Image (cartoon, rainbow, N blue to C red):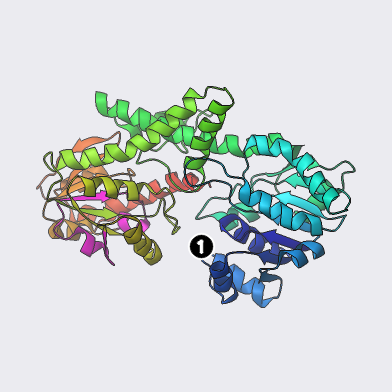
């Protein structure tokens, strides 16, 4: 099948590569000249595990090509997929990019082609789409086209698996009076074994939005629960373990930490609250989710300040992790950047390391005064406190005895609950994490095999990574 994908950002490029991998002929259209040039030079402009190899394979097989010309791609496509950005970067929706794309693409589509929108859109815009698309076609002197919403449920860091092994595929009908659009979409996904749900477009849009809002709510609930645990001396890990056996609740997304970031969850929570307010619909639960999520970042800074004696002035803080989660180079709404800004504003020197070189370089540009270094040891040397903000396996598997010897002041604030408190305290670290209270460092000797090699910390950390993996929803 001939497929044109418009917008080669995160969603569009993953979609293009995966459909090509499943045998379709795909043309990806991108108006950003720098991004298009990089793709044509064989470089994927962002990190996603396995994506660069997949793009390279499909280009070599001549099933995936990239172009700036949308007219030809639209005219020859059996299915046109639109995956352009729809948030304005300031907590609001924007539909100008979508309108411009539709105005350029829809007039040139064949009469029997199908339009599939992958972008997440505001509900009011979804309701306007049938009239808008018919108007565009009418002005071009063309017959109406079939159109659907096909929301994406891919998580950064696991996007290829999420697309090829989807838990569900949803088709939301915008306009498809004779059913040919649905038939074409079913043929496009003939390779998938996932359940296929068909519903009105507005329901499909809310299915996507509702999933992300619920996941965000679970994360903020875990953080509220952690605050209560700290207040009363309970351990949030034990509390959640007891809750997770309840099949109505489960344990995923109930891990306390610095909160969620990325391009989807924070924006969609904020945008929904704003849109609901404008529509006269109160959304106090979602407003609280948003407030708690941002509060975690300032609470993390407060923990740093309290753990080093009440003042940040003149202190050196080593930050481990800059991306909003592991296995991506994405800095959009990354908690680490806000944390670094607050620490710097308090007079601290902040030295940060992240395994992603591109993320390190961009962080230094985004946060004036932030020092970025090329190794963990550089970040922690002479530190008065270490803040673990992103739970990269590299940090969890550290030999923390080496770190202990490098720091000036043995203080660790674990913003993801990814390390085991007892081994850290046994190594002499004062350890703090949300919902775990504070563990004072001990100088008692313990078995080298248990802690000296960092093995106990690493084993705990692997479990933490597994527990965190559902956070890769975007």
Q: Secondary structure at mark 1?
A: loop
In what quadrant of the picture does the N terminus appear?
bottom right
Give coordinates of residue 155: x percent, y percent: 54, 50
* Left-right relation of 363 to 48: left
Q: Residue at x 51, y 62 (%)?
A: 49
Q: Residue at x 64, y 45 (%)?
A: 167
Whether the magenta-drawn stretch holds residue 192 is answered as no
Q: Which residues are magenta?
A: 371-397
Label 1 belongs to which residue? 49
* Left-right relation of 251 to 419: right
Residue 96 in the image: above or below residue 328 = above
Give coordinates of residue 304: x percent, y percent: 20, 43
Count of numbered circles on the image:
1
Confirm whether residue 24 shows in the render.
no
Q: Observer-nearest residue: 122 or 381?
A: 122
* Left-right relation of 118 to 321: right
Give coordinates of residue 218: x percent, y percent: 46, 33
Q: Residues within 10 Å of mark 1 (few under 14, many from 20)?
A: some
Give coordinates of residue 3: x percent, y percent: 75, 62
Q: Residue at x 71, y 75 (%)?
A: 62
Confirm whether residue 443 shows in the render.
yes
Q: Observer-nearest residue: 214 or 418?
A: 214
Residue 393 in the image: above or below residue 59 = above
Whether the magenta-drawn stretch holds residue 374 is answered as yes
Locate residue 24: give its quadrant. Answer: bottom right
> Which residue ends up furthest to the front in the rendered image?
139
């Amino acid at each position: 099948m001939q497929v044109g994908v418009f917008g080669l950002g995160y969603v569009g490029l993953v979609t293009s590569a995966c459909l090509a991998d499943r045998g379709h002929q795909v043309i990806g259209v991108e108006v950003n000249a720098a991004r298009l040039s990089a793709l044509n030079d064989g470089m994927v402009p962002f990190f996603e595990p396995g994506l660069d190899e997949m793009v390279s394979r499909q280009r070599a097989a001549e099933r995936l090509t990239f172009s700036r010309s949308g007219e030809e791609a639209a005219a020859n496509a059996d299915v046109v997929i639109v995956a352009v950005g729809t948030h304005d970067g300031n907590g609001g929706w924007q539909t100008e990019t979508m309108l411009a794309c539709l105005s350029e693409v829809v007039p040139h589509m064949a009469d029997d082609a199908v339009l599939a929108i992958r972008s997440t859109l505001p509900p009011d815009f979804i309701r306007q789409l049938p009239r808008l698309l018919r108007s565009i076609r009418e002005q071009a002197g063309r017959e109406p086209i079939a159109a659907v919403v096909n929301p994406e449920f891919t998580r950064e860091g696991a996007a290829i698996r999420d697309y090829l092994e989807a838990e569900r595929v949803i088709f939301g009908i915008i306009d498809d009076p004779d059913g040919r659009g649905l038939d074409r979409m079913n043929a496009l996904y003939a390779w998938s074994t996932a359940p296929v749900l068909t519903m009105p477009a507005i329901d499909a849009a809310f299915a996507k939005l509702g999933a992300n809002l619920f996941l965000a709510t679970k994360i903020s609930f875990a953080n509220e629960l952690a605050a209560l645990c700290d207040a009363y001396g309970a351990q949030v890990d034990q509390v959640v373990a007891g809750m997770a056996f309840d099949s109505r609740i489960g344990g995923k997304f109930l891990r306390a930490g610095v909160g969620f970031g990325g391009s989807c969850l924070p924006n969609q929570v904020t945008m929904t609250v704003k849109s609901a307010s404008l529509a006269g619909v109160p959304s106090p639960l979602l407003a609280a989710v948003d407030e708690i999520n941002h509060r975690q970042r300032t609470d993390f800074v407060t923990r740093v300040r309290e753990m080093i004696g009440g003042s940040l002035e003149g202190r050196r803080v080593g930050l481990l992790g800059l991306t909003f989660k592991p296995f991506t180079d994405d800095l959009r709404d990354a908690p680490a950047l806000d944390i670094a800004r607050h620490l710097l504003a308090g007079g601290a020197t902040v030295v940060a390391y992240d395994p992603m070189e591109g993320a390190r370089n961009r962080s230094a540009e985004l946060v004036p005064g932030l020092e970025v270094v090329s190794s963990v040891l550089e970040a922690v040397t002479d530190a008065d406190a270490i803040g673990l903000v992103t739970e990269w396996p590299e940090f969890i598997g550290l030999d923390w005895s080496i770190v202990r010897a490098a720091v000036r002041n043995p203080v660790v604030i674990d913003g993801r609950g990814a390390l085991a408190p007892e081994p850290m305290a046994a190594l002499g670290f004062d350890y703090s994490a949300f919902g775990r209270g504070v563990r004072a460092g001990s100088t008692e000797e313990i078995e080298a095999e248990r802690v000296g090699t960092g093995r106990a910390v690493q084993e705990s950390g692997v479990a933490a990574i597994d527990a965190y993996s559902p956070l890769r929803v975007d």
